[in-house]
Image (cartoon, coloured by chain):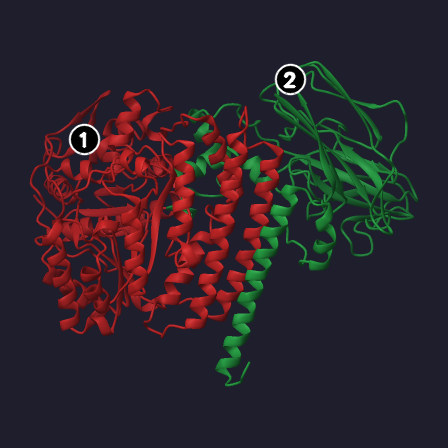
Chain colours: A red, B green
Amino acid sequence: MTHAARILLVGFQDQDNLGLRYLSSSLRAAGHDTRIESFGAGADPLVRAAADYSPDIVGFSMIFQFMAPDFAQVITGLRASGCNAHFTMGGHYASFSPETILQLIPELDSVVRFEGELPLVDIANAIAAGSEWREIPGIAWRDGDAVRLTAPRQDKIDLDAIPWPDRSDIRYEQQQMPIASVLASRGCPWKCSFCSIITFYEGNGTKGRRRRNPKLVVDELEYLVNERGVRLVLFQDDDFLSGGKDARDWALTVAREIIERGLNEKMRFKFSCRSDEVREETLAPLVEAGLRHVYLGVESGDPDALKTLNKMITPEVHHRAGQVLRKLGISFDFGFMLLQPWSTFEQVRNNLTFLREFCDGGYTVAGFCRTLPYVGTPMEKKMREEGRLTGPALEADYTFLDPRLDALWDFSLVAFSGRNYGKEATWDRLRTVLFEARLDYPRERDLDFLASAQRLAATSNRLLLDIAEEALDRLETMERPTAEDPALIELARFAREQNAQVAATMNALWNTRPSVVEAELFR
Amino acid sequence: MHFFYVKTRKWPTGETLAPTEGVTFGGPPDVEDRAAPEFVATGPGSVLQFLFWHTGRRITGKRNVRWNFTTMTWTVWEATKWYGVPGDGGGGPGVIHAEAFSLISNDRMMVDTPISGVTGGATWPFMGNNNNVGTASGPGNIAGIDPLSGLSLCGWQKLVWGGNPDPDPFIESDADVTATNVPGDGSGNVFTFTPGATLHVAQNEGGEALAAYGSSGPPEPPGRHIFDILKWIELDRGRRPWDIRADPPPWDILRRRLVEDLITRTEPGAGPATDFNSIINAVPNMSADDLKRAQSSVKTQVDLGQTALSSIEAQMKRLGKTK
């Protein structure tokens, strides 16, 4: 006899974790009961939650593959506590490497691959009915020592047909500046070599980007703003403007709906997009509707590196986008990979030169990381074919072709610890300060504060880029490059001392105008 | 290529007192002799006295040190001679003043007291100071805190102003140093200069003492082998990966662990207020690198000062006052 299943959903709560919340709402719509628990405090809270809730299924959402060992520890602890529910896991890594994850975590009964709403509902239905779940399409399970993959799911979820994410446990009224995440589309038509988004959705048989009905998107905004008191919306779309003219028209419809319903008087929003999609005629209406921040996937300022990354874009386009955003007066930040696996010295120099110009005047904050070979990306596949990956898939890493760049990266991690990297890094804090300084709701802009914030950003950018260039100069002449070089150690110490002074002034400035958004909005 | 560097630092704050001396070797063997002068002058009326050598592996109060390098399974070997101003420490007649010293960072005394307790007739804490042991009441054995700030106690050293001038040098060597057991990594099995976790002090004895700390963890792996990563995660449970959730990318948090020693060694201090007059006076003697550094530093100070000025002027504007 069928009954409603109880599903405990466990995931890292980062900007709402909409993936988990869409699963919850779909399960509830199918008549099941759900409860959401945060991951990150070890097994004990989950053991207590499981004892209290007696779930039939525990679903784990693993966003970052580096968390796999921690998930393994928690899941082992939960099983050892006597919880005999069906354990399943979803997310990018589990979808691409179900064999690895099922071997690493033997307590898992199954893995839900790619978009999880439909297969998880099917699992819940089967378990509630006491019927076989092992033939459900789009999952993986352990069969003795083997791992079985069922047929890939090809039923292309209609985003307008699934319910809004379950936000029932979020207490917006307790937030000083209520912030909600919203997803207006899924997928991306671009094929950047470092990204697994396109291959993830291909796993469900979908290509490109699926956009929701813009009026239904604004219905969700209206609910969040008028009924839940949300004042800042973070669109979590991979690329809000991708898809050519149709997508631009779609975005303009969203803007028009927001204005017509008066929501632009009550909230602000941010989204992510590519530089070549930043056009004044497209963005100006969105700014009128409340757009106040854009995250750009810049990634590199060197034309050859951009080709390697398959970004299909040039540095000039990035600069043009920066100019448009400055003209519109909204804040922006960006992703930037100073180093990628095929980097050359010249490319790194070009990147630093690019950053100097792109961030001129402290309008935005310079920062950088290196490219990592995530599972499911074309880059990871190519590096594996070339024999350049070290270690197992879960922790695949690489060294650069030029060992001086390995030393440069080690130096960066040391010298810019506290500036680019680490908790409360100056880079993150300055991005938040600049965002807030340009935010005009719920309080007005303070132009003096903005000028001071930009000056600080300019100072921090200068230090970062000067020091990185000096390290590059020194490493270029070294026979056996090492970050242990005494001159580099002194330079790193200098970098950190200077950053500490900038950070102290930034904190003092911050205290003159306390934040209304969470300090960790940008990190 | 191998590099031998000798630094001169001020006790207890760690300021650099003189340019680093450097020697480059093609390979073993090599013998390096260094005699630390008893005094160094750092300016008119400012003279500091020798306290101790950090040889790269050990602490010694001898001013003359010989390094016998026979293996050179290392790239950089750093030695430091420390000087101070008598009276700056806190030790004196009938008072032993003890400081904790990180052999890894080797750039200043640690903040916390190294003393966990004292047995015998000596008094601790003395006069409300838990770095001080009073010896007027009797002798004592000072026990060190172990571990302290995650570092293990390697041994104690009594410091004598001016050091030991014995011409027979303290012998240091790299004979048993391997690629995974390198000077400077602070492994407990490297720093073995004074076994034992206690320091005996006689009745009425006074002066300065050092408790040296190094890492008790495994030495840093020579390679960057990713299979070691999980082990490093285990060592780093205090800092969960999700404390830093987007940038740097997660694996670089792990790679960052592999350069953790360098991060510790370059930890910035509070930093003194900028003294522009001293900078101007020092300019004629600055090297090209020093000039570049000074220029950048002064620019930062000017920028930060401008930010402060802007805040003042903005508030004046708010209050309706003119500049």
Q: Would you identify the image quadrant in which residue A381 lies?
A: top left
Chain to which the residue tagged by mark 1 belongs: A
Q: Mark 2 or mark 1, which is nearer to you?
A: 2
The extreme bottom residue here reads B320
Residue A422 at what x, y percent from top left? 47, 47
In which quadrant is the N terminus of chain A drawn? Answer: top left
**What's the CA distance linking mark 2 and mark 1?**
57 Å
What residue is shown with label 1? A140
Instruction: Tell me if residue A454 comes above or below residue B114 in the rendering.
Output: below
Q: Would you identify the image quadrant in which residue A292 lies?
A: bottom left
Instruction: Tell me if residue A452 comes above or below residue A483 in the rendering.
Output: below
- In the image, which disc is placed on residue A358? none
Determine if residue A69 is in view. Answer: yes
Residue A348 at what x, y percent from top left? 41, 37
Relative horizontal placement of residue A4, taking residue A92 as reference (left or right): left
Residue A418 at what x, y percent from top left? 51, 48
What residue is shown with label 2? B26
